[in-house]
Amino acid sequence: MSVLVDRDTKVLVQGMGKTGRFHTDKAIAYGTNMVGAVHPSRAGQIEVFEGETDHSGVQGRSDTYRIELPIFRTVAEAVAATGANASVVYVPPPFAADAIMEAADAGVPLIVTVTEGIPVADMVRAKRYLEGKDVRLVGPNCPGVITPRQCKIGIMPGYIHEPGRIGVVSRSGTLTYEAVHQLTLNGLGQTTAIGIGGDPVNGTNFVDALRAFNEDPATEGVLMIGEIGGTAEEDAAEWITANMTKPVAGFIAGTTAPPGKRMGHAGAIISGGKGTAAAKIAALEGAGVVMAPTPTDMGAAMMEAMSR
Amino acid sequence: MKIHEYQAKALMADRGIAVPRGRVATTVDEAVAAVRPLVEATGNPVVVVKSQIHAGGRGKGRFKEHPEVGGVNVVLDGLNGGIEAAEARVRELAGQMLGSTLVTVQTGEEGKQVNRLYIEQGIDIATELYLSVLLDRATSRNIVMASTEGGTEIEVVAAETPEKILKEEIDPAFGLLPFQARRIAYALGLEGDALKNGVKFLTALSKAAVELDTDLVEINPLVVTTDGDVMALDGKMAFEANALYRHPDVAELRDVTEEDAAELEAKQYDLSFIKLDGDIGCMVNGAGLAMATMDTIKTVGGEPANFLDVGGGAEKEQIAAAFKIITKDPNVKGIFVNIFGGIMRCDVIAAGVIAAVEEVGLDVPLVVRLEGTNFELGKQMLDESGLDLVSASDMKDGAEKILELTR
């Protein structure tokens, strides 16, 4: 078991530019079931992918692959033709919110948005548009979602992942890799790793991910990685106290970040004294989360949480 | 992106938001020349001379060179002495303020050089209020925040008298609705002409904030005049960087002299860099990992000299540029390169570091931790380059090693 994605996930790509093509190729090599692409001006064409299979992904495949991906004009046409039940958005920032809304309109239940740099106002509108629709948005500005050896949607390196017992949810890309790597080395492995992204306005938040992992029978514990800015970690702490039945470990980045400065991520900013690492760490510790003092200790913190 | 008060007020005036009349001056003569037209147009002999820097707390700020002079000065000399007396006082003030260093609570001890003044009409204030438009991350919507406690920092109001802050959510599909604007105006105690003007102000301001893609619009104080006008006595606007592409007129308002030179240089190479006060330089891929690297340096007892995220898709040239920006800082006593390769390949990082050292040399210790995609190749390249560096097995090990080498 896993959350959000598994071997039955059929994925569409929105945005088949250089980046979209590069990561689609990696996903296919991993064994993700990519079924089509959407590009307004290239509809009717076929995008060919061929190369060497990434055997760290889906097992039991031949050593090479060749996939012909059909390109459609609209998401709705692509869904009708392929039965896609997930979409990954690589569309450039000015057009990305529109791509998200188009996917939602077409009824795609999972929309993973990798694009970094989408204007906040566009995301405010997109989230308003998604209200009341049965759609899960992950991201934007995130590495994506992966269920090891089943389905990889996004830009994370597949080979560091190993199937296992821990759900990972994170606002940071490389810190997720760091965490996943440690969980692979210490044998805990991952059920699913979800990057929720570093933007101030995003789709899936910590609470959504925690709830999903709490309900997933295969997930035995959760590792959550937060950072300064906003109150998503505090909200998560409150939810954990009230609802979580599984052990949680965590790390918060940005203890040394100066106030008023955006630390790379658009959402990583301490403003008006709000969103400090200290407040988040205190809230999570209060909820019984085992906090790693440094990222190097994330795997060990998870081990400790599991043994309590 | 921040802009100056006078620029924010010009943008507001263009959008029907009431602001006092004023003129910007970069020389003493321009400052003096601004006085007569202002006094003649308004009939008020009082003018205000305001320092234009990208930092708050100007009113209570003091100049290093002239401790008796504040960052904002109300010139009353015209009340008895006429325009000539006002002009003489403005000449004296402008001479002291222009080119001098203003220290406020937000500038830090080093202060900021004042290169521009804003000469504004005097206003007969009846009430001072507070108004802002900003993103509420919890609801993913913009909100209008208002308070009767004008002139006080909103953080202080929030901490001491949170009941005095009211909020109205702006639905992106509808904008601020008229009844919401009225609700704020009533709560602010506005009546008669002030009520009408306040509603107009609120409506125009919330519309402008959305149209201009602002991060923050803050009017503190918003004033009600003795005539019932509602005006932005101060005006702060910051813009969302990701949306600047659709506001070329706003992008032109950037004042690079207000920004850190190293941060600007980093931006040219698409690097995310923030200068800090410590002595251990760090180069990292990914914002979260870069923050966590700073934290880890601090945890083991060191002080980071910077935040530097080279991003996910940096090329060799960007890595080299990043390395050079770090080594340029005279405070840097050692460098910690911490990479978890995903899309970013460790061999690209290694090639960039080698190229930078070949070009500019390296006279401080270097610790490198490579993990993830192509880490073996990266390590091999660094080994074969003959570079004098220390390898680290993980992030904490790297932080400890660089600390040891710099102490």
Image (cartoon, coloured by chain):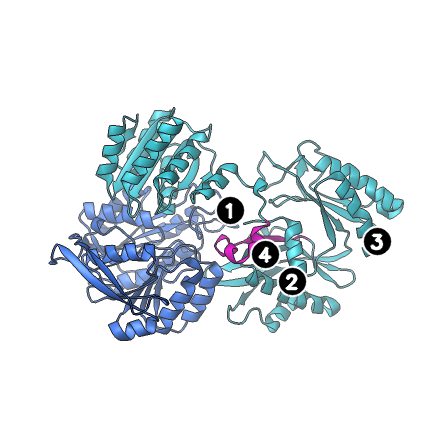
Chain colours: A blue, B cyan
Relative to A38, does residue A227 appear above or below in the rendering?
Answer: above
Picture coordinates of residue B399 (x, y %)? 33, 34
Q: Secondary structure at mark 4?
A: strand
Q: Which residue is mark 2?
A: B15
Q: Is residue A250 above or below residue B194?
A: above
Name the secondary structure under disc 2. Answer: loop
Q: Is residue B248 magenta?
A: yes
**Residue type at the position of mark 3:** Glu
Within the image, what quadrant is residue B231 found in?
A: bottom right
Q: Secondary structure at mark 3?
A: helix
Q: Which residue is mark 1?
A: A260
**Residue in the image at 35% along x and 28% along y:** B358
Q: From the image, which quarter does the C terminus of chain B lie in?
A: top left
Q: Residues within 10 Å of mark 1 (few under 14, many from 20)?
A: few
Say whether residue A107 is visible: no
Q: Nearer the viewer, residue B303 or B19?
A: B19
- What is the distance, in whole Å, between disc 4 and disc 3 at their CAs? 31 Å
Instruction: Report whether mark 3 lies on the same chain as mark 1.
Output: no
Dot label at residue B40: 3
Q: Which residue is mark 4?
A: B217
| Mark in the foreground, 1 or 2 | 2
**Within-10-Å neighbours for mark 3: few <14, some 14–19, many 20+:** few
The spot of residue A181 in percent (x, y) is 24, 46
Instruction: Tell which subunit mark 3 falls on.
Output: B
Residue at left 33%, top 54%?
Answer: A19
Q: Earlier in the sequence, mark 4 or mark 3?
A: 3
